[in-house]
Image (cartoon, helix red, strand yellow):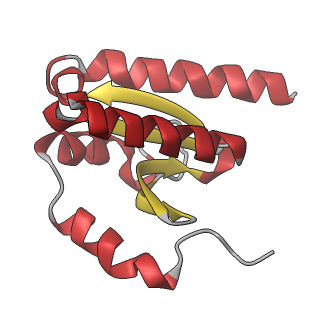
Amino acid sequence: MPDIYNKYDNLDIRRRLRLHSTKSEVILWKQLRNKRLLNLKFKRQYGVDNYAVDFYCPKFKLALEIDGGHHLEEEVKEYDQARQEYLEDMGIAFLRFTNEQIINELKTVLKIIAEYIADKASEAK
């Protein structure tokens, strides 16, 4: 099976997404980068098959997605749902947050992520 992670074909897209990060993505990335959350490695704009997820923790196969206002549009919601189901079929779990949650409730968001990881870690034992 060919490698499906960070395909070279999608490098420019991932690079562009990193260069044009939203305010919410920048805020969350400051909390995740350099193993700042639970000493876990997170990657930003990580490629899985032909998709990119906002943040990805390989150890727990966890994708973090930050949804802005355009994610409320019906066409975008359908795309997001199909993409998420496809990646979940590959064993990747998703946690979704809104821009507003990141900006206004960052501690709660980090707590939700940490609790999810703690639950998965205890299941693995």
| The one of 49 and 109 positioned closer to us in this rendering | 49
Up/down of 52 relative to 74, above or below: below
Question: How many numbered dots are placed on residues in this image?
Answer: 0
Q: Position of residue 86 (x, y in %)?
A: 61, 46
| The one of 59 and 11 positioned closer to us in this rendering | 11
Q: Position of residue 63 (x, y in %)?
A: 51, 42
Q: Position of residue 125 (x, y in %)?
A: 87, 27
Quadrant of image for the N terminus? bottom right
Q: Position of residue 29 (x, y in %)?
A: 30, 47
The residue at the point 19 percent across, 30 percent down is 99
The residue at the point 41 percent across, 44 percent down is 36
Q: Quadrant of residue 31?
A: top left
**As drawn, is 21 to the left or to the right of 3?**
left
Residue most extreme to the right: 125
Up/down of 111 relative to 3, above or below: above
Q: Quadrant of residue 72?
A: top left
**As drawn, is 102 to the left or to the right of 123?**
left
The residue at the point 15 percent across, 27 percent down is 103
| The one of 82 and 3 positioned closer to us in this rendering | 82
The residue at the point 53 percent across, 34 percent down is 94
Residue most extreme to the bottom: 8
**As drawn, is 71 to the left or to the right of 119?**
left
Up/down of 66 relative to 120, above or below: below
